[in-house]
Image (spheres, rainbow, N blue to C red):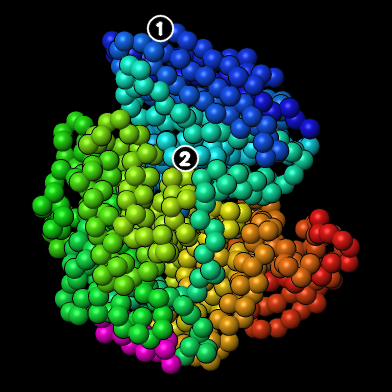
């Protein structure tokens, strides 16, 4: 077993004279508490054995006479692996849509495709749009990472299990060390002030990377009081059929269909997505396509026996919005020119010539009061109890803020706290486009991948773009978060055979992967074009999904190989009956044959279910998977456990 330990902490800061300096706390191996002081600045650390690993809690205090600015705190973790050891690391993505997966350490190609991307793309998918040279994006994970020895089968986990005070990264440029970093954004620490840093967790074990990731999620969820107790969610969303062309009449027509088809499609929530608002940022008023207003449509949804759901993007606004016209001081500003920071682009969001969306400043008390009032109105007055919050990364955009003493991580959390306070504890809040750590304990559900789409993925330009295949990758990579941090939202299932470029195998692959994850189950079709076969598929999917979800709080849903980079990937979930449900996906363009012995499932009887055709197949030695297809596997134990 490797001997992973915290070898040093380095605090980087800017002194009163404007000079960049550092204070180091070294030789931490084998000690419980340590501290260092230099010129009135102190850093202390306490190491606690817990959760099968070590929790590191550090505090910075300014005992001097002058204010300083905090840049970052560096935690260097020794993995115990040799610099030349063949190893991989799990590169976890920044926010909901950002890709996560295994990467070889020390690969010759050190550039990342996003290095040359436009600023808005980097702002969306990185905690820092421009990485410092010593922390290249190709080697950098967000929030946590796992280093896996390819020869010894051992894993080292390092990650922040709190995220209330800062954004954070972990860089793995060589197998022998992990450089974790709390990004402190040059916040001021005045004389006599102190700041507690988010706790870090370090563990090493002879376990799979997927199980180590689940351990990180378990510890983080406990530390941050994750909201994991909401009921299994089943619903309908307007987005993936109507997109922003949704109308009040289309909503009403689907509501009537869903009410009449309740036995075929047993759903609880009907959610109106983007396309209703009078302007981006003005969420309580509607455009001409919704003449009855939000309160009326919510009343009709509730009268039909469903929960009413609504989409907003609360940290974005367009120039022609009432909010931006009346409150230009509520935005994050560029320090150089005083202009608001651009955090999105969509010509469908505005009638003006400026199609950019601008980032709102959640450190501003007036804007926070607006959020509390707005979401109290949407829930209490209008009647929406299911709230989808999108494009949340905008609140963490770099720039000048109203309160310079808050980090970007603290700012976005302040905004989410205001929304929760307004909406109330009973509202189901779904985060989307959200930095992962800062939402734990505040949202009930979280999108854990990019948007699905009515095509497989050939037109997508990157792993954060909408496409079904990239969404499937993310469902597998982040399955371990379900019922540990929140309810995972794998995004919507599209059942329709018409008005889509997904073929039968691809639609079934989407259904199969969602099923095996146990995550939320929302469909997004014009109900008038769905037939009896679609209803049959949905009911089968809903039954298996609920079965997997019901045991997920006890046993995590895990990737068969979290570090997998090939075309065949999969999930496995223990069931309450003592067996397991597994899923195998062939995301590639060629047929694949999977040898059952390679999966290391132990002594089990295996039946495969093809959701596209509804057939059961008894499996002996191998399973053939067509391109872009997936199969559900039912595993019955012959021995006392599944390996």
* Magenta stretch, overall SS: helix
Q: Position of residue 167 (x, y in %)?
A: 43, 37
The residue pinned by badge 2 equals 163
Q: Nearer the viewer, residue 344 or 52?
A: 52
Q: Which residues are magenta?
A: 247-260
340 horizontally vs 104: left or right: left
Which disc is residue 389 wearing?
Answer: none
Q: Residue 464, relative to residue 126: is it above or below?
A: below
Q: Position of residue 354 (x, y in %)?
A: 16, 54
Q: Going 32% across and 51% down the picture, which residue do you hit?
A: 418
Q: Where does the N terminus fall, quadrant-wise?
A: top right
Which disc is residue 39 wearing?
Answer: 1
Q: Going 34% across and 44% down the picture, which residue do you hit?
A: 414
Say which quarter of the image contains residue 153: top right
Q: Which is nearer the N-term, disc 2 or disc 1?
A: 1
Query: Circle 1 sits in a helix, a strand or a loop, which is it?
Result: loop
Q: Position of residue 336 (x, y in %)?
A: 19, 30
Q: Residue 120, relative to residue 81: is it above or below?
A: below
Mark 1: few/some/many CA within 10 Å (<14, 14-19, 20+): few
Query: Circle 2 sits in a helix, a strand or a loop, which is it?
Result: loop
541 horizontally vs 437: left or right: right
Confirm whether the magenta stretch covers residue 597. no
Q: Position of residue 228 (x, y in %)?
A: 54, 58
Confirm whether the magenta stretch covers residue 252. yes
Q: Nearer the viewer, residue 17 or 512?
A: 17
Q: Nearer the viewer, residue 313 or 347?
A: 313
């Amino acid at each position: 077993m490797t001997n992973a330990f915290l070898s040093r902490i380095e605090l980087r800061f800017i002194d009163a004279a404007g000079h960049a300096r550092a204070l180091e706390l070294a030789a931490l191996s084998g000690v419980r508490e340590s501290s260092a002081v230099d010129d009135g600045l102190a850093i202390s650390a306490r190491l606690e054995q817990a959760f099968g690993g070590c929790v590191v809690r550090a505090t910075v205090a300014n005992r001097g006479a002058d204010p300083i600015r905090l840049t970052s705190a560096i935690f260097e973790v020794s993995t115990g692996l040799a610099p030349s050891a063949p190893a991989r690391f799990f590169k976890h993505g920044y926010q909901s849509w950002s890709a996560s997966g295994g990467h070889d350490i020390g690969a010759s190609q050190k550039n990342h495709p996003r290095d040359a991307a436009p600023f808005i793309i980097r702002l969306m998918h990185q905690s820092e749009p421009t990485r410092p040279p010593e922390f290249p994006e190709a080697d950098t994970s967000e929030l946590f990472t796992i280093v896996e020895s390819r020869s010894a089968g051992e894993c080292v986990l390092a990650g922040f299990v709190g995220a209330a005070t800062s954004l954070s990264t972990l860089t793995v440029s060589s197998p022998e060390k992990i450089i974790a970093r709390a990004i402190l954004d040059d916040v001021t620490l005045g004389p006599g002030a102190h700041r507690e840093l988010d706790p870090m967790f370090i563990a090493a074990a002879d376990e799979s990377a997927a199980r180590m990731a689940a351990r990180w999620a378990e510890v983080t969820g406990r530390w941050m009081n994750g909201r994991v107790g909401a009921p299994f969610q089943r619903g309908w969303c307007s987005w993936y059929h109507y997109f922003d062309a949704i109308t009040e009449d289309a909503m009403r027509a689907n509501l009537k269909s869903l009410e009449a088809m309740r036995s075929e499609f047993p759903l609880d929530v009907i959610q109106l997505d983007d396309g209703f608002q009078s302007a981006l940022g003005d969420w309580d008023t509607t455009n001409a396509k919704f003449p009855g207003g939000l309160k009326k449509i919510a009343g009709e949804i509730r009268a039909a026996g469903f929960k009413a759901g609504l989409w907003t993007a609360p940290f974005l606004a367009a120039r022609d919005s009432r909010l931006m016209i009346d409150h230009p001081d509520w935005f994050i500003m560029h320090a150089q020119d005083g202009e608001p920071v651009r955090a999105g682009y969509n010509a469908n969001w505005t009638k003006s010539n400026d199609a950019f969306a601008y980032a709102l400043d959640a450190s501003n008390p007036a804007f926070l009061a607006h959020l509390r009032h707005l979401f109290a109105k949407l829930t209490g007055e209008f009647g929406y109890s299911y709230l989808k919050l999108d494009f949340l990364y905008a609140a963490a955009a770099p720039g000048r803020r109203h309160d310079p003493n808050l980090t970007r991580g603290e700012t976005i959390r302040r905004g989410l706290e205001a929304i929760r306070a307004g909406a109330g504890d009973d509202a189901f809040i779904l985060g989307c486009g959200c930095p992962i750590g800062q939402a734990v304990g505040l949202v009930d559900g979280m999108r854990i991948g990019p948007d699905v789409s009515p095509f497989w993925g050939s037109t997508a330009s990157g792993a954060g773009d909408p496409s079904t295949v990239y969404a499937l990758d993310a469902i597998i990579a982040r399955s371990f978060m379900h019922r540990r941090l929140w309810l995972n939202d794998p995004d919507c299932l599209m059942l329709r055979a018409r008005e889509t470029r997904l073929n039968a195998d691809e639609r079934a692959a989407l259904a199969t992967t969602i099923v095996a994850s146990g995550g939320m189950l929302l469909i997004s079709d014009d109900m008038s074009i769905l037939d009896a076969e679609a209803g049959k598929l949905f009911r089968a999917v809903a039954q298996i999904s609920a079965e997997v979800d019901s045991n997920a709080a006890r046993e995590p849903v895990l990737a068969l190989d979290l570090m997998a980079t090939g075309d065949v990937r999969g999930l496995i979930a223990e069931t309450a009956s003592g067996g397991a449900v597994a899923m195998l996906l062939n995301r590639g363009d060629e047929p694949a044959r999977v040898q059952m012995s390679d999966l290391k499932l132990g002594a089990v009887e295996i039946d495969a279910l093809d959701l596209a055709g509804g057939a059961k197949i008894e499996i002996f030695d191998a399973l053939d998977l067509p391109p872009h297809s997936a199969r559900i596997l039912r595993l019955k134990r012959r021995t006392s456990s599944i390996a």
